[in-house]
Image (cartoon, grey):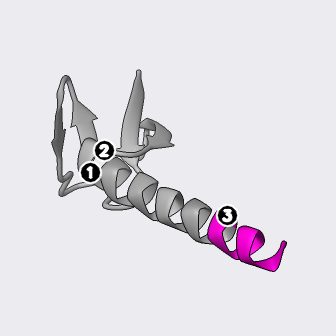
Amino acid sequence: MMTVQCCSCKKIRKGSRWVMMTVPESQMCISHGYCPTCAAKVFAEIRMASRNHHLAAASNA
């Protein structure tokens, strides 16, 4: 079974919830993604960087 782990905070998705896993299971197949909390932070940073890039490009034109 595939387990999804947040690549930022390392929480594991269990159904619709994200929980901290205390003991790693060595036989676990892990896929990485972002939990909703970390996704919101990362995407906000990406949007800000994109806006800054566009503003800098526009001021240099």
Q: Which of 1 and 33 is in front in this view?
A: 33
Can you identify the residue that label 1 sits on?
11
- Answer few, some or many: residues within 10 Å of disc 2's Cα (few below 14, many 20 plus, some between 14 and 19): many
- Which of labels 3 and 2 is toward the front? 3
- Determine whether label 3 and label 2 are within 8 Å by CB: no
Q: Earlier in the sequence, mark 1 or mark 2?
A: 1
Instruction: Tell me if 53 is positioned left or right of 46 in this view.
Output: right
- Determine whether label 1 and label 2 are within 8 Å by CB: yes
Image quarter where the N terminus lies is top left
22 inside magenta stretch: no
Range of magenta residues: 54-61
- Name which residue lies at 18% across and 25% down: 16
Disc 3/disc 2 C-alpha distance (Å): 28 Å
Please, what secondary structure does the residue beneath circle 1 have? loop
Image quarter where the C terminus lies is bottom right
* Visible residue check, residue 42: yes
- Answer few, some or many: residues within 10 Å of disc 3's Cα (few below 14, many 20 plus, some between 14 and 19): few
Q: Which of 60 and 14 is in front in this view?
A: 60
Q: Earlier in the sequence, mark 1 or mark 3?
A: 1
- What amino acid does circle 1 point to? Lys
Please, what secondary structure does the residue beneath circle 2 have? loop
Mark drawn on residue 50: none
Question: Residue 12, relative to residue 43: is it above or below?
Answer: above
* Visible residue check, residue 7: no
- Name which residue lies at 81% across and 78% down: 60
Please, what secondary structure does the residue beneath circle 3 have? helix
Disc 1/disc 3 C-alpha distance (Å): 34 Å
Query: How many badges with numbers are in the image?
Result: 3
Looking at the picture, how far across and down is residue 50, in whole percent? 60, 60
Can you identify the residue that label 2 sits on?
35
Mark drawn on residue 54: 3
